[in-house]
Image (cartoon, helix red, strand yellow):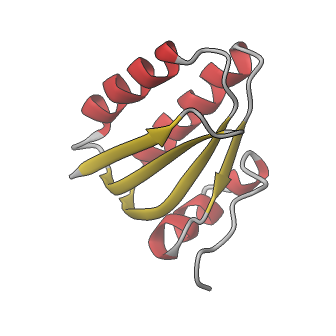
Amino acid sequence: MFQLSHDPSCQPAQMRLGGSLTIYEVAAAHAELLQLLGEHPDHSWQLDLAELEELDTAGAQLLLAVLHHLEQAAATLQVCNASGAVLELLELLRLQALYPAVMPANR
């Protein structure tokens, strides 16, 4: 099950993803993320993936869409605390080039 929590009052604004972000959750996650980004269109964000347990290519594609959305709004996205399988998939897909701040939580 996908979980999204956020704190837009921080600098950069904080967004935390938890649970699973797979093909089964991506439609609901997309709607939640678009709503959040729409409410705070000019914020730069730090995306914490420490509690994200499962990520597949559909979820990775959604993360790329979030990055693109923020770039269009002249905002930034810093990804941190990827762990385990999440970090492995991001490395396999060579997305660490797009997310240079991706750091393992406990590696």
Q: Position of residue 89 (x, y in %)?
A: 53, 63
**Residue that appears at 39% across and 19% down:** 35
How many numbered discs, if any? Answer: 0
Hey, which quadrant is residue 56 in on the image? bottom left
Q: Eyeballing the image, is 81 above or below 107? A: above
The residue that appears at 61% across and 20% down in the rendered structure is 69
Image point (67%, 16%), residue name: 42
- On the question of residue 58 being in view, the answer is no
Kindly indicate the quadrant of the structure image that contains residue 4: top left
The one nearer the camera, 102 or 93, is 102
Is 38 left or right of 22, judged from the image as shown?
right
Relative image position of residue 30 (x, y in whole percent)? 37, 28
Q: Which residue sits furthest front?
A: 9
The percent position of residue 101, horizontal first and vertical second, equals 76, 56
Q: Quadrant of the C terminus?
A: bottom right
Q: Is residue 20 above or below residue 61?
A: below
Judged left or right of residue 60, residue 104 is right
Side of 24 relative to 16 (left or right)? left
Figure check: 9 above or below 98: above
Left-right relation of 50 to 94: left
Residue 44 visible? The answer is yes
Residue 53 screen position, x and y as percent: 36, 66
Q: Nearer the viewer, residue 25 or 23?
A: 25
Residue found at x 39% / y 44%: 5
